[in-house]
Amino acid sequence: MATGFPSVTGDVVTSNMWNGLVTFTLNAQTGTTYTLVLNDSYQTLITQSNASANAIKIPTNATAAIPIGSVITLLNIGAGLCTISAVTSGTTTVLSAGATAASPTLAQYKSCAMIKTGTDAWYVVGAIG
């Protein structure tokens, strides 16, 4: 979880707090499927490293209440194509400019941001296919 945020309205942001705002927690994944969890919403960089095709799944809000406005960053460092999609496509909406809007893909060394804009609404932007 991110550190350095002011804890109450009116707190003064110190240089130590400010420097903490740009630090990401690394969540290194090597399997073929990973489903986002609540802790991924706090300045997390997910790296996906697998030589085979793999998937990042976005859960329903009922499963993981990731706050609206959260941005989760993903970097595919493995050779396998990484597909991002909803665990429950009828409930969670994933939209992107990818070839398949609901299931964008990331090639090796490409990254994207998954942005939660509503209770079960996500946009995926970045180097997607």
Image (tube, helix red, strand yellow):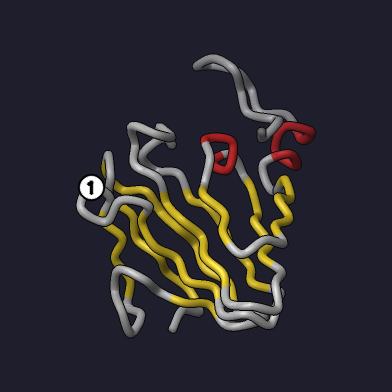
- In the image, taking residue 69 as reference, residue 120 lies left or right, namely left
Q: Is residue 23 visible?
A: no
- Mark 1: which amino acid? Thr
Q: Residue at x 52, y 49 (%)?
A: 35
Q: Residue at x 36, y 80 (%)?
A: 98
Q: Nearer the viewer, residue 66 or 60?
A: 60
Q: Is residue 73 shown above or below 6?
A: below
List the residue tagged with mark 1. 91
**Residue 19 picture quarter:** top right
- In the image, taking residue 107 as reference, residue 99 lies left or right, namely left
Q: Nearer the viewer, residue 68 or 120?
A: 120
Farthest residue, direction right: 16
- In the image, taking residue 46 as reference, residue 95 lies left or right, namely left
Q: Quadrant of the C terminus?
A: bottom left
Element under disc 1: loop
Q: Is residue 88 shown above or below 84?
A: above
Q: Is residue 36 shown above or below 75?
A: above
Classify mark 1: residues with Cα within 10 Å, few (<14), some (14-19) or many (20+).
Answer: some
Q: How many marks?
A: 1
**Residue 97 picture quarter:** bottom left
Residue 88: percent from left, percent from top = 30, 51
Residue 59: percent from left, percent from top = 40, 45
Residue 114: percent from left, percent from top = 45, 58
Q: Is residue 37 visible?
A: yes
Q: Residue at x 46, y 56 (%)?
A: 57
Residue 124: percent from left, percent from top = 40, 65
Q: Residue at x 34, y 42 (%)?
A: 60
Q: Quadrant of the N terminus?
A: top right
- In the image, taking residue 89 as reference, residue 87 lies left or right, namely right
